[in-house]
Image (cartoon, rainbow, N blue to C red):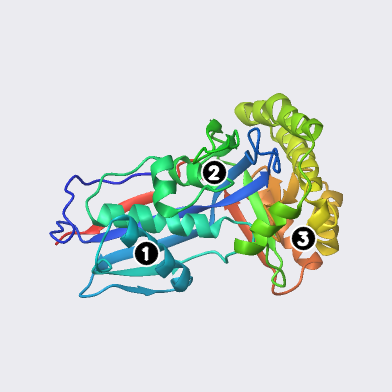
Amino acid sequence: MRARGSSSKLRAMTTPGVEVVAPSRLHFGMFSFGRTDRRQFGGVGVMIDRPGLRLRISSAERFGVRGPLAERARAVIRRLAEAWQLETLPECQLEIVTAPPDHVGLGTGTQLALAISAGLNAWRNVPPLAAPELAALAGRGDRSAIGTYGFQHGGFLVEAGKLPGEALSPLEHRVELPEAWRFVLISPNTQRGLSGEAERRAFGELPPVPEETTARLRHEVTEELLPAAKSGDFERFSRSLYRFGYEAGTCFAARQGGPFAGPSIARLVETIRRTGVPGVGQSSWGPTVFALLPDQYAAGQFAEAMRRHTEPDDAITISPVNNTGARVERTNTA
């Protein structure tokens, strides 16, 4: 994540325009939950360029928000104003130019909150914050920290999980995946994943992950997925990615009815595997399904073939890996 600026003044801006471009997040699965006497949550994920989030902040006579997810943005702004102890909201216009749908497994809420927080910090000439401080300011990281570290660093990420009382799960590993690799996303238009209070209730009702399952998931990551990521071994990474996601998904079977978010998602995953693509899974609660292809040409061919197996309104997106994190940049001078 890049930003420049040194003054802490709120209104005397030398560069009133700021633009933030943030990636999206794929979450492959968690290591554990339901056991408060040890680390829980944690897990594995990756940042991708598309569909990403882009917002602009510019000077204005009074605060305003426009664009998709405006209501969610206003809630973030109110939290920031309280954290900064501002009597009035910042005198700026925040425009959300583009944003992925929320609650489809792409971590949109986290990226929006972090983008607004980092953007307004830059607009106020406050130096960039590290991931833990930015997460605390934005109110993110209660469970997963993949999106927080991914916003700052990008790449393939492994986080340890949180101990009781720990604000943010520690980052264990970050690996830059090969630039040629492409993730093809299929997002059914008729479903939404869990979020907010419904998600909190679900975690409260799910049975704890057995220690043996956590041990197998960690073994899969340390012995297969992580080494394959470091060496750029596409086939090995793809096979391990499916195994990890499937086993992690079984931990949510009491809520989902299986390792995936319903029969239609399970059928889609099997359809993809029958095409000969081994690296497939569900991101977070879904409904977004991802498939890993070795390059842009293969991804394009696969995406075209999959249109015969999806509904017309389903979104199919081809994305490179994002290995750099978000961009926070000045856009004009006063």
Give the camera-side residue of 193 and 229: 193
Q: CA distance from mark 2 to mark 1?
A: 21 Å
Give the residue drawn at x 52%, y 37%: 166
Label 3 SS: helix
**Relative horizontal placement of residue 121, taking residue 14 as reference (left or right):** right
Q: Quadrant of the N terminus?
A: top left
- Mark number displayed over residue 251: none
Residue found at x 53% / y 38%: 165
| Amino acid type assigned to the residue bearing label 1 in the image | Ile
Contact between marks 2 and 3 (CB within 8 A): the answer is: no
- Residue 58 position in % (x across, y down): 26, 66
Q: Classify residue 239 by image quadrant.
A: top right
Residue marked by disc 2: 145
Count of numbered circles in the view: 3
Left or right relative to 301: residue 113: left
Q: How many residues crowd mark 2 within 10 Å: few (<14), some (14–19), many (20+)?
A: many
Quarter of the image for residue 294 reads top right
- Kind of residue at badge 2: Ala
Real-space CA distance between mark 3 and mark 1, rounded to the nearest whole angstrom: 43 Å
- The residue at 56%/55% (across/down) is 107
Q: Which residue is mark 1?
A: 77
Residue occupied by mark 3: 305
The answer to whether any part of residue 178 appears in the image is no
Q: Is residue 149 above or below residue 256?
A: above
Q: Position of residue 105 (x, y in %)?
A: 64, 57
The quadrant of the image that shows the C terminus is: bottom left
- Local secondary structure at mark 2: loop
Q: Nearer the viewer, mark 2 or mark 3?
A: 2
* Nearer to the camera, 39 or 113: 39
